[in-house]
Image (tube, rainbow, N blue to C red):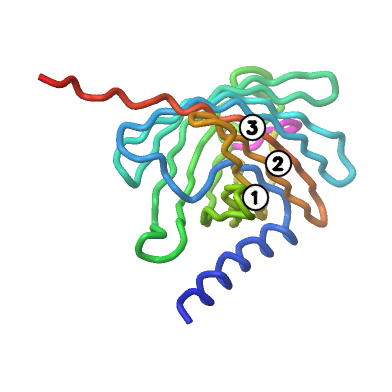
Amino acid sequence: MVKTRQVALLLVFWLVGAVTASGQVLLTGEPGGSGAQNVAVTANLISPKAFANLTNVWAQYGYGVTDRLDFFAAYGAIRVFDKTQHYVGLGSNIGVLQRSRNGLDVSLLSSVSVPLTRRNEAATLLVTLAFIASRPGKIGSFLMTPYGGLEAVAPVGGRARDVFTPVETLHAGIAGVAIPLRKTWTAYVEYNPGPHLRSGGAGVVVTIPRRQPEVQ
């Protein structure tokens, strides 16, 4: 019975991610853990209805503050209409549920980004909140971690010409998979269809091995 509920909950997260508007998190619901470090390089294509395609490329450094809290900093660039905007961001991923106790890893992602260039064509701040659920699994001998969830993206301090950020809060779905490539390399693929917005993205995360304590 418990296993059935766990599968049903994960399926709900996947279905929600498949039928709502687009969002990109490229993260699972499992924080890295205390002292963990990683570097991610990611990109996605955003296709809003009745608007030109936007490309978003960013790099991110993450650090595990505790076993349930990851902190990260990002730098990225968005391009549309032959214009490029550069931005920086800060955020966190907080573990809410752990699969060792609850059958699923569930986390709360929060981030805020600030434009560095073309500020008159974007909101002052772009705030992102997301619930993410995941659970590792195998298909034969192939290991992967499917994840899904819900995301809200809210502009704060909109400008007269918002080109690089939305003019109102958008609610998005999340459906993706993390695939380990090597011991310290993981690939992420995510797709987010919706009635007014479609988005697809991919990224590679490199985990920095933890320093082992010296033996006296």
Q: Amino acid at mark 2?
A: Pro
Dot 1 lies on which element? loop
> How crowded is the residue under tag 2: few (<14 C-alpha within 10 Å), some, or many (20+)?
some
Cα–Cα span, label 3 and label 1 = 25 Å
Dot 3 lies on which element? strand
Question: Residue at point 77% right, 35% down?
Answer: 45
Q: Is residue 196 above or below residue 213?
A: below
Dot 2 lies on which element? loop
Are dots 2 and 3 in contact, CB under 8 Å? no
Dot in front, 2 or 3: 3
Residue 65 lies, in percent from the top left, at 31, 36
- Residue of label 1: 169
Question: Residue at point 57% right, 38% down?
Answer: 180
Question: Residue at point 66% right, 53% down?
Answer: 175
Main SS, magenta region, reads loop
Question: Residue at point 63% right, 54% down?
Answer: 140
Q: Amino acid at mark 3?
A: Gly
Residue furthest to the right: 50
> How crowded is the residue under tag 3: few (<14 C-alpha within 10 Å), some, or many (20+)?
many
| Range of magenta residues | 157-164
- Residue of label 3: 203
Are dots 2 and 1 in contact, CB under 8 Å? yes
Q: Is residue 191 above or below residue 88?
A: below
Q: Is residue 82 left or right of residue 186?
A: right
Q: Can you see residue 97?
A: no
- Residue of label 2: 166
Residue 207 lies, in percent from the top left, at 46, 28
The disc at residue 194 is none
The C terminus appears in which quarter of the rendering? top left
Say which label, 3 or 1, has the lower sequence index.
1
Quarter of the image holding residue 19? bottom right
